[in-house]
Image (cartoon, rainbow, N blue to C red):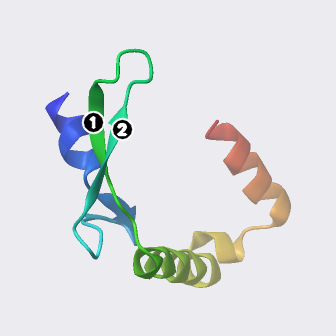
Amino acid sequence: MELVSNLSRRQFIDGEWVESSNKETREIINPYNQEVIFEVAEGTAEDSERAILAARRSFEKGEWANETSENRGKKSKSDC
């Protein structure tokens, strides 16, 4: 559970686990007993922008750029 705890305080952006730009976290609470289950990174607008730009860059220049929409669909479904 410690691995989940450590990773949940970070965000996966541009291929790396990173802290949120404001370094804040948010507690996730079990609604049944009100206990804190774990903490997650409190993402900011800046973090969202970084993630969006990384996704766009990857889409335009990465593997997906050369794939047909049919193959992208097949690969996406195989991940589910």
Q: Residue 70, located in which quarter of the rendered image?
A: bottom right
Asked whether 12 or 9 is in front, the reply is 9
Give 41 or 34, whichever is nearer the viewer: 34
Which residue is tagged 1?
38
Most extreme residue toward the top, as rendered? 32
Please, what is the three-letter code of the amino acid marked with disc 1?
Answer: Phe
Identify which amino acid the numbered label 2 is placed on.
Answer: Ile
Residue 8 vertical position relative to residue 12 in the rendered view, above or below: above
Could you tell me if the residues under marks 1 and 2 are in contact, i.e. CB atoms within 8 Å?
yes
The C terminus: image quadrant: top right
Tell me how far mark 1 sits from mark 2, CA to CA.
Answer: 6 Å
* Comes first in the chain, label 1 or label 2: 2
Q: Is residue 29 left or right of residue 65?
A: left
Please provide percent x and percent y for residue 44.
Answer: 41, 73
- Residue 1 lies, with reference to residue 3, above or below; the image says above
- Residue at (26% x, 74% y) in the render: 22
Dot 1, how many residues are within 10 Å of its Cα: few (below 14), some (14-19), or many (20+)? Answer: some
Q: Residue at x 78, y 52 (%)?
A: 73
